[in-house]
Amino acid sequence: MPARLVIEGGVPLRGRVAVGAAKNATLPALAAALLTSEPVTLTNVPDLGDIRTMLRLLETHGAAVARDGRRVEVRVPRVANDEASYELVSTMRASVLVLGPLVARHGSARVALPGGCAIGVRPIDQHLKGLAKLGADIAIENGYVVARARRLRGARITTDLVTVTGTENLMMAAVLADGTTIIENAAREPEVADLAALLTSMGAKLDGVGTGHLEIQGVPALAGATHQVIADRIEAGTLITAGAITAGDVTVTDVAPEHLEAVLAKLDECGVDLDVGPAWVRVRGPARPGAADVTTSPFPGFPTDMQAQLMTLLGLADGQSRVTETIFENRFMHAAELVRLGARIETDGAIAVVRGVAAYQGAPVMASDLRASAALVLAGLAARGTTEVSRIYHLDRGYEHLEQKLAALGARIERTSR
């Protein structure tokens, strides 16, 4: 039987817990190793399924990978193969991040179209339009993006919408292009800035990092580098919300609070007691949270990756809340499972109306995606009785040993396949 989590709810969480490194910063940093023949070493690398998939993909391109605990060294003396197969790309959308580096260094790439996932289509048209502006010939052949360029040329690129992986792919392509590239409407997420920090340490020339206007001066070649990946702001937000929803007292450490300002502001609005230090957040949950309205938006707005977790907290609020999802078109799949636990949630397109209930009741529930699975775990921690969360392979894609961290705070949670 597949693994699932069994949770006995009703225990206020107490203690200290450290946040791991960001998966969404680690994956582009690994892809950046394709840009140089010298070693790129990342420290603080989480042990997650998506990371292992990316390392396998890099090995198919000719990378030598050495892993020692949280330290990973990737060296690509030469690109041996320019194809990212559907077998690997279909299991992890972030595989598309090899597209820009392969074209920039090797002159060609064949990358399987990622297709959809449970929370939406997430097309890569902005990546392709940008690469075409940089001078790449782009074709779609048998379900693969085929891109070729003798050498990319600097260009002005204005994306139609803010795209994190699109910005990262185009940044990595532009650092080796001939001339200056300007990316307008660039993503401002901390993960983008972390990739820029790595590229700069490799010898790239970037200006405007953290703004919507990126300017990149291409260089002939990049060197190796050693880089510590930033903390996972979504794991941090999830753990802080776990303290809040259980009326607990939890200090979350190894965190960058400046990456969480929108989340912390919304929790404060809900009546959660927060103390914020330079690299920690102490959360004390109220007996019952207050209602609040929230709309997701690109950084520095409220992150879509925290929407499900906040909705779970609002499900127990004293009053009615309204959640508006602007990033993904199908990201309320957790709502029906929360209703199984006793929540009163009605969804209509991109809007969910949440009428708070006094308590959740334990029940079997099923995860549909990564953040939905985290939301269901949070609901189980707060619920009366036993909650069983199945399909937790979604959870394992983005959270490293979450149940162990929660158990150390006093949660009655167990992974079982019985």
Image (cartoon, rainbow, N blue to C red):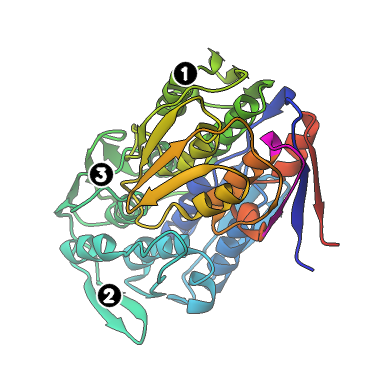
For disc 3, the marked residue is: 186
Observer-side mark, 3 or 1, equals: 1
Looking at the rendered image, the quarter that the N terminus falls into is bottom right
Position of residue 200 in the picture relative to residue 5 (left or right): left
- 79 in magenta: no
- Gap between marks 3 and 1 measured at Cα: 29 Å
Report the residue marked by disc 1: 268
The residue at the point 21 percent across, 60 percent down is 130
In contact (CB < 8 Å): disc 2 and disc 3: no
Rendered location of residue 94, percent (x, y): 46, 60
Mark 3 or mark 2, which is nearer the start of the sequence?
A: 2
Residue range corresponding to the magenta coloring = 381-390
Label 2 belongs to which residue? 148
Name, please, the residue furthest toward the bottom.
142
Please indicate whether residue 274 sits to the left or right of residue 119 in the image: right
Residue at the right extreme of this rendering: 418
Q: Badge 1 local density, few (<14 within 10 Å), some, or many (20+)? A: some
Residue 418 vs 80, above or below: the answer is above
Out of 302 and 353, give the one closest to the viewer. Answer: 353
Q: Residue at x 41, y 32 (%)?
A: 321
97 and 162: which one is in front? 162
Where in the figure is residue 40, as x and y percent of width and height?
53, 50
Q: Amino acid at mark 1?
A: Asp
